[in-house]
Amino acid sequence: MSSVSGATRKKVQRKFKIRGFTLKVDALEEVLSFLSRFQDAENEALDLLLDEIDNESLKSSILDKDAVHRVVSLLLEAEAAVEPSGGDSSTDRSGLRVIDAFIIPKFCYDPIKKVFYEHTGRMPIHGDAGAKSALYRDRFQLLLQRISRDPHFSRPVFDAEMIDSRSCEITSIQSLIGCTGRRWIMGVISQLEDGHFFLEDLTAAVPVNLSNAISFPLFTFLLIVNTCGFPPLEDRDASLAVIMGLDFFGGGSLSSEENLRLSVLEKKAVNDMFVILSDVCLDNEEKTMAKLAAVMDGYENVEVVPSLFVLMGNFCSRPCNLAFSSFSSLRLQFGKLGEIIGAHPRLKEHSRFLFLPGPDDIGPSKVLPRIKFYTQEIVFFRQDLLYRMRRSSLIPPSKEETSDPFEHLVATITHQSHLCPLPLTVQPIIWNYDHCLRLHPTPHTIVLGDTSEQKAFKYTGITCFNPGSFSSDSTFVAYRPCTQEVELSSL
């Protein structure tokens, strides 16, 4: 290892020391031998090695050669598992999986045992009345178990003074009877009577006065409400530690070895790119079809073609309701789209195409795919959500932190851990499959296909963006999942 520079040795020792490890001489040589295989990505390889050593059950913080060699062997096996690319796109097809919403497992929370358990019964499309009540109960239990772990809302065990003065432990509404002083409660704001709002949990409901309330993320609720906010967001890693390997996202649980293998493959997939377009009205030949051809012409000639094209509806400029009679014309337009794709041989051979119907397309809007890119979880949702949420808002959001409506929307759905936290009267959903709309644990990326202005926003590590309306504004997004880089594009 004489060719390894002194600077590299010092860097390795410094990074291991920051993580709390001390390397013996033979262990250092093992690390340097591993890094020599990745000269173009030395820092990334070192960080990955450190991450995996952190996950090992070690008897001592002083590492010898054997301890390092075990992890290095796993990483090199993953490296050897990379198949040579036979085309222009670098993605192994097995690394990009599209998950049907109807196969996502449903997990419910048991507040007594404080664990999640999988629902194993039958879930028909047309649920009974019990399914509707279970929908709200499961949403509430999911948020309550999350907030109970937050240090601001958990009861101190030993600090008696804090228990009396500063504890924000959540109290059930029923427990307020006969109580004096300040209490913190969590519930759902409901309109049980015309013109009167109530704060409701699983035990009772209490009327609240929202006339002077402002929305502000202080997470406090008062009977005469001065401020109100959402449950605090939980870090993805903290949520994963609690669910202990349960597959909330769909696609199956993976072993630690498989996760390690996919992590290595993901870091190597630097050339992968998704091109995402929303509101693609195919019946507008002069504008939409010509613009689609222009986009594909551009990507046909790049060095590495996109691995995935996502086209979201509405695919017709008129609602496909009972009065719609142009189904043969719509089939013809999809045929023309197929001809455009066929005219680009590199895209046809190496790219995949995913189509998501919009809210006004043919049939029930039941297509809600999720994508797993190696270890990354990506959620797609096509709905004009921003308009609906603003119209249904009870209290104007505070502009102290931001006045951007899209940023308020992202904060709302992530804190609520739900893609569509609207009343069922505003947005009906299939009761038994409400769990498919959950955002728990938080995914890496959320794509909100909306006809509103094109936007991108990174919120607490979650990448969120709206590609905008391709038909109206000629906007779309080029997304690199390896780095979570969002490129807002337009023609």
Image (tube, rainbow, N blue to C red):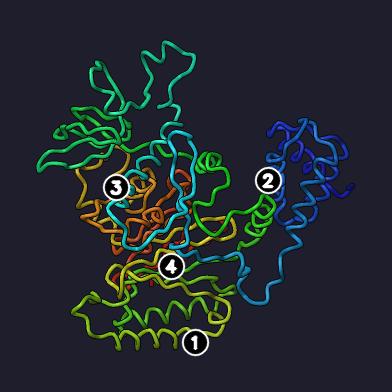
The amino acid sitting under disc 4 is Ile
Q: Position of residue 395 (x, y in %)?
A: 20, 41
Classify 10 Å Cα crowding around label 1: few (below 14), some (14-19), many (20 and above).
few
Q: Residue beneath label 2, please?
A: 47
The amino acid sitting under disc 3 is Ser
Residue drawn at x 18%, y 79% is 323
The amino acid sitting under disc 1 is Gly
Q: CA distance from mark 4 to mark 3?
A: 36 Å
Q: CA distance from mark 2 to mark 4?
A: 31 Å
Classify 10 Å Cα crowding around label 4: few (below 14), some (14-19), many (20 and above).
many
Q: Position of residue 233 (x, y in %)?
A: 42, 39
Q: Residue beneath label 4, please?
A: 276
Q: Name the residue nearer the viewer: 38 or 385.
A: 385
Q: Is residue 384 above or below residue 6?
A: below
Q: CA distance from mark 3 to mark 2?
A: 47 Å
Q: Earlier in the sequence, mark 3 or mark 2?
A: 2
Q: Residue beneath label 3, please?
A: 133
Q: Earlier in the sequence, mark 2 or mark 4?
A: 2
